[in-house]
Image (spheres, rainbow, N blue to C red):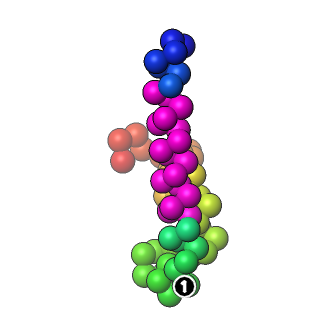
Amino acid sequence: MSAPGWIRNWVRQLGEAGRRRRARAELRAMNDLELRDIGLGRSDIPSVLSGQFGRVDGPGAQAGR
């Protein structure tokens, strides 16, 4: 990877890390009722932050849905 490409990737990753950190802080600050209002439980927070929440990747999953 070229130096400009590496730097661009590094800056993007820093921005993404900051976004995840802010999202984690906001979700952890919510009480259980607030989380339930948006369809989440406290145990869902890690999967939301990793982008796995609500994904359908198993057998029978339909592409494009």
Q: Is residue 24 toward the left or the right of residue 15 in the image?
A: right
Q: Quadrant of residue 31?
A: bottom right
Q: Residue at x 35, y 41 (%)?
A: 64
Q: Which residues are magenta?
A: 8-24
x and y percent of residue 51 in the render?
A: 52, 51
Q: Is residue 9 toward the left or the right of residue 63 in the image?
A: right
Q: Is residue 52 visible?
A: no
Residue 14 inside the magenta-drawn segment: yes
Q: Residue at x 55, y 77 (%)?
A: 29
Badge 1 marks a residue whose secondary structure is: loop
* Predominant secondary structure, magenta span: helix
Q: Is residue 46 toward the left or the right of residue 5 in the image?
A: right
Q: Residue at x 62, y 61 (%)?
A: 46
| Whether residue 1 is situated above or below residue 47 in the rendered picture | above
Number of marks in picture: 1
Q: Residue furthest left?
A: 64
x and y percent of residue 36 in the render?
A: 49, 81
Q: Is residue 3 visible?
A: yes
Q: Which residue is mark 1?
A: 31
Q: Residue at x 53, y 31 (%)?
A: 10
x and y percent of residue 37 in the render?
A: 43, 81
Q: Residue furthest bottom?
A: 33
Picture quarter with the N terminus: top right
Residue 4 inside the magenta-drawn segment: no
Residue closest to the eye, 10 or 47: 10
x and y percent of residue 8 in the render?
A: 46, 27
Q: Amino acid at mark 1?
A: Asn
